[in-house]
Amino acid sequence: MEQRDLLLITPPFTQLNTPYPATAYIKGFLNTKDVSAFQMDLGIEVILGLFSKNGMQSMFEKAFDNGRITSQNSQRIYALQEPYLQVLEPVISFLQGHNETLARQICTHNYLPRASRFEQLDDMEWAFGNMGMQDKAKHLATLYLEDLSDFIKECVDENFGFSRYAERLGMSANSFDEIYEHLESDLTPIDIITLNILEKRIKEVQPKLVCLSVPFPGNLYSSLRCGQYIKKHYPYIKIAFGGGFANTELRSVTDVRVFEFIDYIALDDGELPLELIVKDVLDPDEERVFKRTFILENEQVVYKNNSTTSDYKQSQVGTPDYSDLLLDEYISVIEIANPMHSLWSDGRWNKLTMAHGCYWGENVLFVMFP
């Protein structure tokens, strides 16, 4: 793989069925500046690693070693681990759209092992009609994965969730103490999968700057874990934070401990702040000029906004670039039989932004088109 100056990362977890668009927009902008960048959705890569036969086998082994298989539901899943593992990779392939003929088998009563998620099974004929076999199968396959997710959460890692990780810690981030304590503790099994994938990508890309887009509280913990790992093993690589969570919850950051894990926090409209951060990394001898960026200076958190350059207009930021992302490996799920609820998680959606980013106190409209 060709070496790139930047590695753009969406950390675990956001959606299963489509990439969060922030890195694609940033990569499109960087293309206009001839800055080389590679982007990855670390979240979907971790999910695919976890919900593989080897990954889930490891979860069963860790649950047994932990001695936490105590509830009737987790005992049932553990007892049926061989049937769960046997169909796991075919089910994932089906939900990726690679094996549509599996739908008929999934809809039979004896193909998927079943635990508590199936106890509240909706009236399938009412929900999907006589012709909706693909949707029926997606719904059943989703319940099967949610059973496994419940097992992981109960017996291996209480912070796990399909579209968020350790969200509670992120939502209480106005006090850094609790999340800092977790970051000082041993790696979780999900952390290990995450960091193994990150390590491989860093060796391939050899970036000078890693940019972590943190849209939601459920992305914060993994972002900081990634930063912690990079700081320890690749101290020469700089790390920048941006995204919706930074724009709202980190606007008044003062705790210097945050900068044990990162070097820059960029706020609001991200193109110009990132361009100046890139210059700071690639041309360290030049005068340090920033736009809406927190850095650590003289052991204090300092807000830098000393650039006189105006932000780019939307017509100047280029076209979103989705290259590098594993677009054919996302997973379409139907969590609730109601078809309106399935719009969020079923099918590949590209998000068309009708405003220029996630801003503090501003109204932003996202419209999704298939």
Image (cartoon, rainbow, N blue to C red):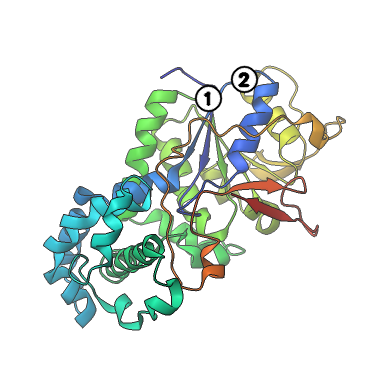
Q: Give the CA separation, mark 1 to mark 2.
A: 8 Å
Q: Which kind of residue does numbered mark 1 sit on?
A: Lys
Q: How many labels does the image show?
A: 2
Residue at the location (44% across, 36% down)? 230
Closer to the chain start, of discs 1 and 2, is 1
According to the picture, the residue beneath numbered tag 2 turns out to be 282
Q: Is residue 361 left or right of residue 96?
A: right
Identified by mark 2, the residue type is: Leu
Q: Residue 277: where, in percent of width, then height?
A: 67, 30
How far across and how far down the image is residue 159, in percent? Answer: 39, 65
- Residue 208 is labelled as 1
Is residue 128 in view from this perspective?
yes
The foreground one among 223 and 75 is 75
Q: Check contact, mark 1 vs mark 2: CB within 8 A.
A: yes
Which mark is on residue 358? none
Mark 2 Cα within 10 Å, few/some/many (few <14, many 20+)? few
Examine the rendered structure and indicate whether residue 318 appears above or below residue 333.
above
User: Does 353 sit above or below residue 105?
Assistant: above
Q: What element carries label 2?
A: helix
Residue at 36% across / 53% down in the picture?
95
Q: Which residue is drawn at 60% across and 32% down?
A: 321
Q: Can residue 187 be seen in this view?
A: no
